[in-house]
Amino acid sequence: MKEEERARMRTWAIVLIMACGRVGFDGIGDGDGDGQGAGTDGAGDAVEASCAPIACASAGGACEGDVCSIDVTALGPIACPEGLVCQFNCVQAGTCSDGIDCAQAVRCSIDCSVAQTCNGGVVSCSAGGCNMTCPAVNSCSGLTFECAASCSIDCCGSLVCNGNTGVTPHVPPTCP
């Protein structure tokens, strides 16, 4: 290999290392090489996945600490990227109504604080579970929950949580 080719390869290697944002192994990951997932720290204690900014941005969100926060403003299905903890904020009428896919997520929270959100569709949840909060009028009805573990739905608004399957509604004493 010529010296010029070696120099070019070293330059690309440095660029790739810098693009990844770190050098070395930090003990967090699930071993599949994607840099996401849960793992253990040096003491063997479980460590939850941190937010991956590129994956979160690809879903329309932004990292807020370890959570990928997504303001849902468009109609259509939504999905949390694999290995992330997601917070969906359904901020326009009709949103979060065509399917919510959290099957590959660590866990998801869905906030249906705007009237006529989160109606219809399938909510698929991983072993980490999903939590849906429904304080707005005419929200969270006609949903089918497919939960690998625990799912919860807090129904504290008016005309909410009608005709859902796969989850038992909870009525908290006060709305969040």
Image: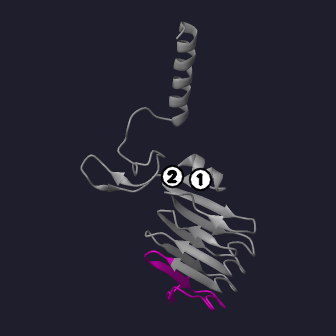
Mark 1 element type: helix
Name the outermost residue toward the front.
1
> Residue 72 at x, y = what percent?
69, 65
Q: Nearer the viewer, residue 99 or 116?
A: 99
Q: Which residues are magenta?
A: 147-176
- As drawn, the label of residue 158 is none
Q: From this view, report whether residue 83 is shown above or below residue 53.
A: below
Query: Vertical placement of 97 versus 47: above or below?
Result: below
The residue pinned by badge 2 equals 51
Main secondary structure along the magenta-highlighted residues: loop
Residue shown at 30% from the left, 49% from the top: 41
Q: Position of residue 16 (x, y in %)?
A: 54, 30
Label 2 close to label 1 by CB (< 8 Å): yes
- Judged left or right of residue 101, residue 170 is left
Of residues 156 and 38, which is closer to you in this image? 38
Residue drawn at x 59%, y 53% as measured from the top left: 56
Question: Looking at the figure, which quarter contains the C terminus?
Answer: bottom right
For the point 58% across and 75% down, which residue is it?
A: 123
Queried whether the magenta region covers residue 158, the answer comes back as yes
**What's under tag 1, amino acid-wise?**
Cys
On the picture, is 120 further left or further right than 69? right
Q: Residue at x 50, y 86 (%)?
A: 172
Residue closest to the far left? 43
- Can you identify the residue that label 1 sits on? 56
Tell me which label, 2 or 1, sits earlier in the chain. 2
Counting from the top left corner in percent of width and height, residue 80 is at: 58, 62
Label 2 vs label 1: CA separation?
A: 7 Å
Question: Does 158 sit above or below residue 83?
Answer: below
Q: Is 70 situated left or right of 148 in this image?
A: right
Decide: few, some or many residues near mark 2? Use Cα within 10 Å; few <14, some 14-19, many ≥20.
many
